[in-house]
Image: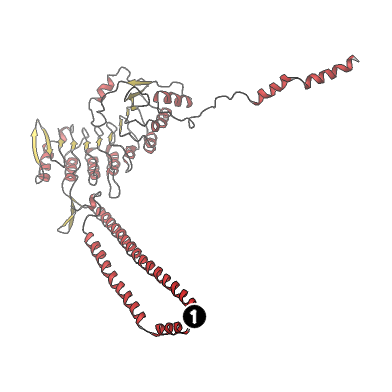
Amino acid sequence: MSRKKQPKDKVVQEVEEPPKVADTKSHQQPPEPAPVQTFDDYHCTGNVEVDFPMLCSLLNMKDVPPVIRQIPSAIDSDVTFKEDEDAKLSASPLRGTPFLCIELENDDPLCTRKVKISGWKVNYKIFKAVLKMLPSVTTLQCLHFWQAALSDPMVISLANTSLGSNLRAVTLEGNPLLQHSFHLLLSEDSNLTHLSLRNNRIGEEGARLIGSALSTCKSANKNLLSLNLAFNNIGDAGAAHIAQGLRLNNTLVILSLANNNIGDAGATSLAMTLGELTLQHKEIVERRRMLLHKIQSSLRADLEQTVGGHLSVIHSTSSKGDTKSAVKKKNKAAKKDEKTTETKVKRGSDGKRPQSRTMKSGGKEKLSSPQEDKSSSILTENQGEALDTGNPLLMQSVHRRDGVLYMPGNTTLTSLNLAGQGTKLQRNLCLCSWQLWKDRRMWEETCSVSYCRETSSLQTLSVT
């Protein structure tokens, strides 16, 4: 009997055992582990000191460069180009040590205004982390890479990334590229206002790409104010490409071409850009195309306006006719006598009413014709005037003389630095420039440095 009761007791214990129920509940609701984040899923906070190490760790980097705060100083390198910047960087005790230097506007870690990498090689993982972090730093104003061994894919990624809305100055110095991709930073929709590309071995081909980015017949950079191309060995041919880019550029104010092995030929190309220009064939073709487009658009607008007016008049007359016909129908249904039918027959046989309608329609046609004449006359008058003051090809100052179209040269550039060209560029530039500009400018020489001053055109020209 005792052996038979033991299994019953076991069954009772198995049924009534509460700890096992508690275990099942604990298995059903375990503590949620922290989700494993990936590089793409990480949301940057805007704090560089937190985001940069985290992004580097998510990229499985062993040696993560530290983030070092620098004492805030007045923003001067964003607007002007300091020639002693290299000396400051070379004198830094941390030169060559991988670290990310940041400057803050105040004590708030979310207010980073400058990110700088100087003197150490940046691999693709570090650049990828910096690139992902930049859009979240909304207060960033300046981005600086000095001798960081950047590559063409890095610069292309930088140009294609939507950076912070306040970023206006980019310095990429000492980073020669094989494909010369720097011109991508000067696209038509770029928001950069200051760009320094010193010592990048740009050469003639890079100068050609940068000149095309400054302006062509169909596009032009609209935000860049200062450009530093010093120490790039662009030569006379490269200076000619830059001069071509200055023809239709209305924004660039400061240009440095110092130490570029430019001779009299290249300086003459630059000087001719600042004088009166003869329109080239491709510029004439583009000007005609833009004029035709403007005239066609104005014709469409006038046509839509006149058609809309006629339709409104017709709609109002038709609505009045509908109300009158409804009243007449009600009167016909109410009266139903022979006198009303006889008057209807008389009105239908009488020819006065249709004649008056034809006279009214004819009067409308006579009134519409002078409006069309006025619009056509206005269009013919506007064909010879400026239709868009934003494009130099459509300005009122474009004029024809002796069968040739002329336009004024670049009047926006106020500072051009041609210093450090050695013996190739001497007083021949001053003499050539004087012959080109003698009717427009006054020259003075002080301490072997030539200056050209005017309120709305070139103010400073350094040739020594």
Horizontal and vertical percent for residue 416?
Answer: 19, 37
Q: Nearer the viewer, residue 386 or 17?
A: 17
Outermost top residue:
2
The count of marks equals: 1
Considering the image in quadrants, where does the C terminus appear? top left
Horizontal and vertical percent for residue 374?
Answer: 24, 65
Splitting the image into 4 quarters, where does residue 215 fall?
top left
Q: Nearer the viewer, residue 18 or 230?
A: 18
Dot 1 alpha-carbon crowd within 10 angstroms: few under 14, some 14 to 19, many 20 or more: few
Horizontal side of 222 relative to 130 (left or right) equals left
Horizontal and vertical percent for residue 282?
Answer: 26, 53
SS at badge 1: loop
Q: Residue at x 8, y 34 (%)?
A: 445
Splitting the image into 4 quarters, where does residue 293 fall?
bottom left
Say whether residue 444 is visible: yes
What colouring style does the render use? secondary structure
Say whether residue 118 is visible: no
Horizontal and vertical percent for residue 299?
Answer: 30, 62
Splitting the image into 4 quarters, where does residue 377 fall?
bottom left
Horizontal side of 325 relative to 94 (left or right) equals right
Q: Nearer the viewer, residue 332 or 305?
A: 332
Name above or below for residue 77 compared with residue 436. Answer: above
Name above or below for residue 389 compared with residue 226. Answer: below
What amino acid is at disc 1? Lys
Q: Residue at x 26, y 64 (%)?
A: 375
Identify the residue under disc 1. Answer: 336
Considering the image in quadrants, where does the N terminus appear? top right
Q: Residue at x 35, y 36 (%)?
A: 165
Outermost right residue:
1
